[in-house]
Image: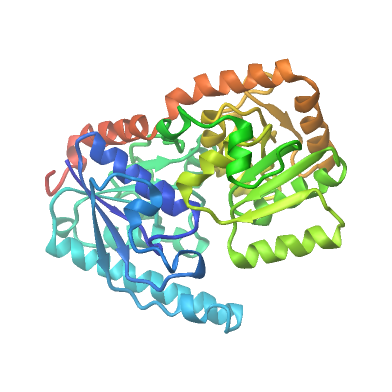
């Protein structure tokens, strides 16, 4: 099967969706598909400006091609110098110029199927007359923008829907979006190989200049508020015996978060900043406990998300303390493979961390079970499910061949 994976993102990017996309492309290729990753020409951001080899940066095989299409990108060089409303307009211009480029590209190159996680790209494709359109699949990561929901009848032209959580699937059904379109849930995943021979905790700490004697609670990911990192910071203020390690975040978000830590007089936190994706496993190896403090205030965290870090935590054999949310309960069970605590509650998170530290037998038990459970969530198994769903699409939805 020929598969064009279309992603409107800077590539490489410091954001997790870039890593998610390339790992999925790699896995599709490993499962026998012929894959092209189609991305726009865009300006680089500071965190990735010096990266010249995408495959090396992400630690992936060179088993798929990368095709770059034009887009009018004024967002990256101007976003921090113009009012937010103007930045939003510039972003919309970039999005739609790329989406139109993808639609035109399909007319020229019609082999195989198109797979995207970007709603504007999907819409631009579905608006094409049927004889110009390939079979088209949508991987949903969040609610559709309200500005796009009015074109409801066009969404049902898609050949398949792949929401990343049961909560997101339910949302699509409640909104009567993608009516009649086959649905397959694809939680995010992990590559287990980097986690099979991790160094001992002491060695990992020495190699990355982390405190060797301290009890380390680690968070890996972006520093957005809905990720719950500010709640984790406040929990650390109540647990001076624990040192919090924050791996990830853009320069701007890291600066804002460090300012918060200073204002709240939280001294037992260390911000590492952005690291290449393959490095994350080695930081996890250094931790005593890993933290997934997702906020429940926004629906994306409460019901829709399927965090990459969750599956990386599970693969690393480290005990997990996470927010008790429907999105995370699709994978985690408290007392079995994690400790779940009420979201947005620093006191509860602090108690969860202390329980793990004070009960080493419980920590070992849940970490071991999490490692067993994550075997069902590898990138290759995810790719197998996606390819199987695409290859067995209803006959009446097939057009333009494979």
What residue do we see at 23% from left, 49% from top? Answer: 64
Q: Is 258 situated above or below 293? A: below
Which color scheme does this rendered protein use?
A: rainbow
Q: Is residue 307 visible?
A: no
Side of 217 relative to 112 (left or right): right
Side of 393 relative to 208 (left or right): left
Q: Is residue 165 visible?
A: yes
What residue do we see at 55% from left, 43% from top? Answer: 305
Side of 251 relative to 37 (left or right): right
Q: Give x and y (percent) for residue 329.
A: 61, 30
Image quadrant in which you'd find residue 326: top right
Q: Is 216 situated above or below 120? A: above
Position of the N terminus, as image quadrant, is top left
Q: Give x and y (percent) for residue 203.
A: 59, 35
- Number of residue marks: 0
Position of the C terminus, as image quadrant, is top left
Q: Give x and y (percent) for residue 199.
A: 53, 32
What residue do we see at 28% from left, 33% from top? Answer: 389
Q: Is 118 situated above or below 194? A: below
Q: Give x and y (percent) for residue 324.
A: 70, 33
Q: Nearer the viewer, residue 218 or 307?
A: 218
Toward the bottom, the furthest residue is 82
Image quadrant in which you'd find residue 385: top left
What residue do we see at 19% from left, 61% from top? Answer: 106
């Amino acid at each position: 099967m020929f598969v064009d994976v279309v992603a409107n993102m800077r590539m490489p990017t410091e954001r997790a969706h870039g890593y998610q996309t390339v790992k999925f492309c790699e896995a599709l290729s490993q499962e026998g598909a012929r894959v092209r990753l189609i991305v726009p020409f865009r300006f680089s951001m500071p965190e990735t400006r010096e990266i010249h080899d995408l495959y090396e940066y992400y630690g992936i095989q060179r088993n798929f091609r990368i095709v770059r299409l034009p887009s009018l990108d004024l967002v990256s060089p101007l976003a921090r110098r113009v009012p937010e409303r103007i930045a939003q307009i510039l972003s919309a211009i970039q999005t739609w110029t790329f989406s139109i480029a993808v639609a035109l590209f399909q007319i020229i190159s019609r082999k195989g199927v198109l797979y995207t996680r970007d709603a504007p790209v999907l819409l631009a494709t579905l608006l094409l007359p049927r004889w110009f359109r390939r079979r088209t699949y949508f991987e949903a990561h969040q609610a559709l923008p309200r500005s796009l929901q009015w074109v409801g009848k066009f969404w049902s032209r898609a050949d398949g829907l792949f929401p990343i959580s049961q909560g997101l699937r339910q949302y699509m059904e409640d909104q009567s979006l993608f009516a009649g379109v086959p649905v397959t849930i694809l939680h995010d995943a992990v590559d287990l190989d980097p986690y099979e021979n991790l160094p001992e905790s002491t060695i990992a700490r020495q190699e990355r200049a982390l405190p060797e004697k301290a009890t380390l609670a680690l968070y890996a990911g972006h520093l957005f508020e809905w990720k719950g990192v500010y709640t984790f910071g406040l929990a650390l203020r109540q647990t001076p015996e624990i040192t919090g390690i924050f791996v990830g975040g853009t320069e701007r978000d890291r600066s804002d978060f460090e300012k918060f830590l200073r204002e709240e007089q939280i001294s037992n936190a260390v911000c590492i900043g952005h690291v290449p994706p393959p490095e994350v496993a080695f930081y996890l190896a250094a931790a005593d406990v890993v933290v997934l403090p997702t906020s429940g205030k926004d629906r994306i965290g409460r019901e829709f998300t399927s965090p990459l870090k969750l599956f990386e935590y599970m693969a690393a054999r480290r005990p997990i303390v996470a927010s008790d949310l429907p999105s995370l309960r699709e994978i985690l069970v408290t007392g079995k493979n994690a400790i779940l605590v009420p979201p947005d509650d620093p006191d509860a998170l602090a108690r969860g961390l202390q329980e793990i530290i004070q009960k080493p037998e419980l920590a070992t038990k849940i970490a071991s079970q999490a490692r067993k459970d994550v075997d069902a969530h590898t990138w290759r198994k995810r790719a197998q499910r996606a390819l199987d769903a695409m290859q067995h699409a209803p006959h009446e939805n097939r057009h333009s061949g494979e």
